Amino acid sequence: MKKIVSLGEVMLRLSPPSNERFFQAKQLNIEFGGSEANVGAALAFWGNHVIHLTAFPDHEIGLSATANLRRNGIDTQFIKYYPGRMGVYFLEQGAMQRSSKIIYDRADSAFTKLDIKDFNWNEILENVDALHWSGITPALSQECADFTLLALKEADSRNITVFGDLNYRSNLWNFGKEPHEIMPELMKFTNVMIAGTRDFNNCLNQEFETFEEAKAELFRQFDSLKYISTTKRKSLSSSHNKISAKIVSRNNIFRSREYNLTHIVDRVGTGDAFAGGLIHGLLHHDPQQAVEFGMAAGALKHSVPGDILLCSESEIQELVLGESIGKIKR
Amino acid sequence: MKKIVSLGEVMLRLSPPSNERFFQAKQLNIEFGGSEANVGAALAFWGNHVIHLTAFPDHEIGLSATANLRRNGIDTQFIKYYPGRMGVYFLEQGAMQRSSKIIYDRADSAFTKLDIKDFNWNEILENVDALHWSGITPALSQECADFTLLALKEADSRNITVFGDLNYRSNLWNFGKEPHEIMPELMKFTNVMIAGTRDFNNCLNQEFETFEEAKAELFRQFDSLKYISTTKRKSLSSSHNKISAKIVSRNNIFRSREYNLTHIVDRVGTGDAFAGGLIHGLLHHDPQQAVEFGMAAGALKHSVPGDILLCSESEIQELVLGESIGKIKR
Amino acid sequence: MKKIVSLGEVMLRLSPPSNERFFQAKQLNIEFGGSEANVGAALAFWGNHVIHLTAFPDHEIGLSATANLRRNGIDTQFIKYYPGRMGVYFLEQGAMQRSSKIIYDRADSAFTKLDIKDFNWNEILENVDALHWSGITPALSQECADFTLLALKEADSRNITVFGDLNYRSNLWNFGKEPHEIMPELMKFTNVMIAGTRDFNNCLNQEFETFEEAKAELFRQFDSLKYISTTKRKSLSSSHNKISAKIVSRNNIFRSREYNLTHIVDRVGTGDAFAGGLIHGLLHHDPQQAVEFGMAAGALKHSVPGDILLCSESEIQELVLGESIGKIKR
Amino acid sequence: MKKIVSLGEVMLRLSPPSNERFFQAKQLNIEFGGSEANVGAALAFWGNHVIHLTAFPDHEIGLSATANLRRNGIDTQFIKYYPGRMGVYFLEQGAMQRSSKIIYDRADSAFTKLDIKDFNWNEILENVDALHWSGITPALSQECADFTLLALKEADSRNITVFGDLNYRSNLWNFGKEPHEIMPELMKFTNVMIAGTRDFNNCLNQEFETFEEAKAELFRQFDSLKYISTTKRKSLSSSHNKISAKIVSRNNIFRSREYNLTHIVDRVGTGDAFAGGLIHGLLHHDPQQAVEFGMAAGALKHSVPGDILLCSESEIQELVLGESIGKIKR
Amino acid sequence: MKKIVSLGEVMLRLSPPSNERFFQAKQLNIEFGGSEANVGAALAFWGNHVIHLTAFPDHEIGLSATANLRRNGIDTQFIKYYPGRMGVYFLEQGAMQRSSKIIYDRADSAFTKLDIKDFNWNEILENVDALHWSGITPALSQECADFTLLALKEADSRNITVFGDLNYRSNLWNFGKEPHEIMPELMKFTNVMIAGTRDFNNCLNQEFETFEEAKAELFRQFDSLKYISTTKRKSLSSSHNKISAKIVSRNNIFRSREYNLTHIVDRVGTGDAFAGGLIHGLLHHDPQQAVEFGMAAGALKHSVPGDILLCSESEIQELVLGESIGKIKR
Amino acid sequence: MKKIVSLGEVMLRLSPPSNERFFQAKQLNIEFGGSEANVGAALAFWGNHVIHLTAFPDHEIGLSATANLRRNGIDTQFIKYYPGRMGVYFLEQGAMQRSSKIIYDRADSAFTKLDIKDFNWNEILENVDALHWSGITPALSQECADFTLLALKEADSRNITVFGDLNYRSNLWNFGKEPHEIMPELMKFTNVMIAGTRDFNNCLNQEFETFEEAKAELFRQFDSLKYISTTKRKSLSSSHNKISAKIVSRNNIFRSREYNLTHIVDRVGTGDAFAGGLIHGLLHHDPQQAVEFGMAAGALKHSVPGDILLCSESEIQELVLGESIGKIKR
């Protein structure tokens, strides 16, 4: 198994039970999630040693967030605590033709104010094989952008493979910088990018019209870049999607099968499950296996409530092989 | 926005959670609903000023029913309280090939004994644009039939547009009158009728074979009638329906698209959501927009637990436009 | 209505609510179930007098298990109590491409240690029309195998029709005997067998390649055998199956329609619901009606949470007739 | 063990969870209860054969009510089903200085319309040792009063011991008769009365000032009367009561200890638990033991949610003996 | 009944069910509460016309907050909506020797950024009898302090009676001003103050040693001041408190009885219930009745989950009179 | 902070919600607990590095048990997995005069079959300060007894302080040995014993009449013994206890205050919370502080649902100091 560092904010996720709307809810279910930690949790579930770097408020809910990461098998020893608030997101699960809805309440969280000097990289990165970041972190604050860049440089200098999920979200970049002022420098140190054309356009301030076009330019521009992976989702309704993925190297393209997903339980974190599966696959197998494993992981996540995949390696392999789908296992 | 009066009984709805049958339930979820108030609540949710006329028992559960209407934005100042009982309906949600089941326990409710003299029409109907009634009310008791007729006459005399959902239910007419003894007089004052051929046959003691036939006779017979609207539902299972609607004037016919509804959450109140959308559309837009808005409202209601739609105007418009269905909105 | 004896273990079933995985659950829903008692409960729900023979631990949970059978209309007067433990099974409901998972914790239960001398067959079998057993019981312990054989002999000697669901489960046969050392003797006394080719192969230590082949040999070998029935299930996912059934006599074959089952709620006990329906049909009607009634019962069970069918005879008949599927019944 | 017949209405009890008020509840817990059936259920829990006579509506909720009695060990074979409604009572649990609140919605229930000719007394009363009635039943309707009187006469003619809990409730007597027109005739056939001075005054249209005074007159007036029992409750708050009881014969008086009850869980059905315990004690032991057993049963009921006691004979005996109260039993 | 304006922030309250700690919770119960709105809700429950002035974020949760106030009978027409976040407080209910714990997450809420120009005082204060404010509002931001002062001046100029709960909380004053720079000006316009010695000391930057001392100085310093009221609480544990109150005028002192409160359900909002009761009492009755009514309201609130009292005037009067405490009301 | 090893079985705890009895429950709450791990979890919550040694079945529920320990801050790296079953205990919470009830279903668990050779003591005990065992473990099986003895010898040889909670439970010793054949050898290596007279009598096959008598003999017999600690509990009801503790050395006696505990939430694990507090106190402070800290920890545990204390060091210190008990902390 491998040793992997992930970094990013983990929020308190609050969502009405069953199919209730915010307007009618009397209770909210608690989960803790964040894109990069979701990836980390999937990797830890499969036996990898995963260190997650983040910061929480120094009160009971911050403590509970750490406990939850720890429950999911993540090494939480390098998490920092500061006065401040917990990032929150309210999630209303969609159903049928009604969309899911997320209300972010993450501004000014303790994470956005982390102190870059509190992290000892020699300790953190000792014997680490891979590091995973996403485009959400540098969008949150200058501290977060600096923190990401430093982590990437430290990883790069130790020949650690860097995975990055560009994950552009327009409503996050509020601290005064544009993505293209921050992201290209981070991409320079990234060996495997998970992103679609829209992400590339926003991060690079470009107007690529196709993934092919973007891909060509990216491989040209970024020397360290080895793979780009992207997923394709067709959303027929909140309860019915079709998804597939591919991963491309400079010379090759590897495609997953397409999954027809009906009766969707929880759509959140499915991209993270894919990313986790892809990373696991690339670290332990080859690109073709990686993209199939990642997509099967992503598909299965749609059936699990919460942000985290919680499916074993063998469950995912069974889906890859198409064996005994939907049978009762005794 | 418009000012609208709706009138009718609101019942306590009690239903087992999840997919449980009555036989196995240990808890019942509480909602308050009634066809006309469901229409009113949808209209209020979109910003209209909606007055609902009804009566409740003068105990805590009656008080709670009023509070619930008020929560949904309805103006409850004209609700009356009498000694007596709360109308109740027990709802078992169907699933798959198993039907939903309703056990009515509404006989002798406080509403059926309301005193027609307790309502001051000058106050109630001041500046009102529209009034909505349904065929359920006159079926409940002579008092209720008289109350409906008086309301319609008062509305008519003030040039208020009258909407009526004929909604014939055979098991309701128990107070000694037949529908055709009561309904035609009420239809006379109704400008927009929501009904199908079966409703017309029962209300008029006719045997129309097609909607076309019924429509021709209705426009002939009722001078004030401007529009008839009807919905068509194909029930493949409790979890899978297809629905569409049309609205016809003396000279025109306007059809909505058909929605393919899988993964149904709650089928109750979907006709009311359609009616609400249709009324809103006709009061603010044209018949084509009205029937599309109404049908989209009806479709979305299938995804929301409870009797009430709880979807915003812009959510419905997005479905009409077919935009970003089932995407996560952040 | 008929008088029927069923026999077999009833376990405490513990399952996470909603679609949760074991790993994330904080609560478990309680049901009590076991293949033969599930059959018995369905038969009792339709008005038959059903005696269930089993044994429970002599503590509060054993008491509660009996109370639950009694609630479902089963005659529990011959249930025995011994020191010991309750058999338990943990059930994680699958969804979409994720399989359901059962963890059995039934070893050394009070049932496996029942004392064959505690049952008075003259009393138990007085006026009984039919007896139902399954291949699960003789797999559990020598006491259980002896108990089953004795019950069948006693039934046979009183001309009671014997139904047997062979139900081979490889992980159960742990007490030192192979199926083919025990099952053939039991099959000798069985008039109606519910089983597929795989069950026959394991019970008889054969390698039939087709059901036709197995059937021919079985009718040759077992003189008392009148009918064999088998179901066919195509599992597209945990949420979507297709099922059908047939019953064959020495000279005839009767097939049910195929049901397309989407939005599955609970897959457990669907085979038992089929068996119950088949037995009911054969005792009261003819084989064609029996297989249609059984398959409709099996189909409806997919919509009901828990091990037990809980659908009335008329609900099943409506599905057989294809009437008003998925409509709201008021 | 003894064979006992109880008779009376069983209602659907609906109560908000935790300490919620009606006004704020979103769910209601389901129980089924009624004074006489609560007594019967306690007696059945201790191994007596208890037949309960009642009537339910012929729909799923009536079916469920029967199933619940059956679960509690009651013999339900003589229950009748009629078209009509289920009696309901809404219960808001009090706490601290806030009182518990019951809203009855039981008028016109199927029970109040039972047909006296549907009961075969030779069958019902075969080998019966005791019959239990309460003053609630004759208050409900003329049919119910006639039914009670007939049951008592039939019991009397077979030398069955008759227990009666007079239980006067002013808000029930609405069918046109006064208690004193009905109750004295019923008391004539009653061997053991559970009642306080207020009950006697209302049933006999008297104005006894003390229990002693009432007692003297009752023994004088009713020849068959052997015992009168009464309880005394001091209500410090909804969460803190003190209770004790006594039973008097013509010549003796037997008193229970007083229980100091803090942290009350559910006060409903505590009088019925006392009555059940008293009946059990008198049928199996002596008056002193009966009143202590009854009061201990009544005390324990305060700790059990729902209408029914659900405590074993040995649990009650332990409390009578004052052994290991509040210890963990392993 | 009277017309009353209250003003202040309303927060989303999130609390673990039962007695769970934050660390172990998987669900949070939703309530909406804020000191001044709690007072307003109590007053509205008793039939007063209560307008609440506040501001919410312009998203679904803000909408839901308004709906909840409306449900409680509050007139919400003057509530404003701004971009921004919802103030949140996390509440862990204490039990026994373990304290309750509140984590505030209210910084930068939409309310703290309200625009003073959005309120039309002629409209708002038309026919208003009383206005209620608390010391929480001016502590939140300069906008909030300005808003409070303006409201008080407008009320003063219209001879509206002003009630103020000084309610000093040290952890709130973070916007750069000290209480004594803001509060004295507000107190100048206040006719009835609810406060203890510690509140006065902090608001006036004084060091009064006794309430008597503070009282003398306050009546000297503030001409408009008519009454000061204060409560006294002895906390034996989270589950057991004793409380009493008094109200003083320039010449008199009126004391309530003391309540011994065991089995406490929810301690939050009890001061607000007292304040509501006091205001109601002073507006409709005399000071002695007011302080008894207020204290009974405060006592009863301990038995109701949530921030709001939800007890009727007659329930409170019964407690004042000490009638039938803890009896079941049928 | 210190490094501590605890060892013992962790079971799945299943308990009905609220105050429900087993007989009426439809759901069971999940916790994981075991005496020694409860002690370990308390110690970890206060910042100590705690390694727990145990064994689980190699299926999802075993995995979940580990995750839960990890969530509570316990180092789970040395936990072993074997085929087999999970130990279970069913807990019914008592209330008032009704006792709590535990049904153990722990026989033949994976833990009882652990392989003593799977533990590497050099690794496990590196830098360890203290080891905690209880008398439950050696009672379970010969493997468990051998495992405990080996652990104690290994600790002894490294001068690690050994704490032992003798905890005699008569219903556990079923594997063929008597306590006095096993326990004395284990006590020889124990420096601090937590036990009462009854424990000593059973472990040593003695008949000490007083704690003083036992204490004298123990200090005489066991050279390594430094402290004996014991608690005293007076059980007035399941909801009301009084507790205190003392710790004695060869020359001194240190007593805690007595706590009056009303409104008890969960009595399970309170002895373990005391033990944890005592160990923490002795490792970091002096015996007087230890016994007060331990008893305060034990007292607070009564207010927390589940097996684990979940209270911080400062919360406990506040109770020791008697500060602000039952106040709301903001």
Image (cartoon, coloured by chain):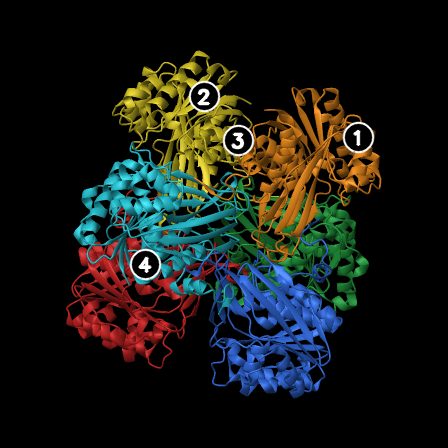
Chain colours: A cyan, B orange, C blue, D green, E yellow, F red
The answer to whether marks 2 and 4 mark residues whose Cβ atoms lie closer than 8 Å is: no
Residue E295, position as x, y percentages in the image: 45, 32
Q: Quadrant of residue F196?
A: bottom left
Residue D86 in view: yes
Q: CA distance from mark 2 to mark 3?
A: 19 Å
* Residue on which disc 4 sits: A282
* Residue on which disc 3 sits: E70
* Residue on which disc 2 sits: E131
Q: Quadrant of residue C246?
A: bottom right
Q: Quadrant of residue E180?
A: top left
* Mark nearer the viewer, 3 or 4: 4
* Mark nearer the viewer, 4 or 1: 4
Whether marks 2 and 4 lie on the same chain: no
* Residue on which disc 1 sits: B219
Q: CA distance from mark 2 to mark 1?
A: 57 Å
Residue at the (33%, 22%) spot, across then down: E142
> Depth check: A202 or A108 in front?
A202
* Mark nearer the viewer, 2 or 1: 1
> Depth check: A82 or C234 in front?
C234
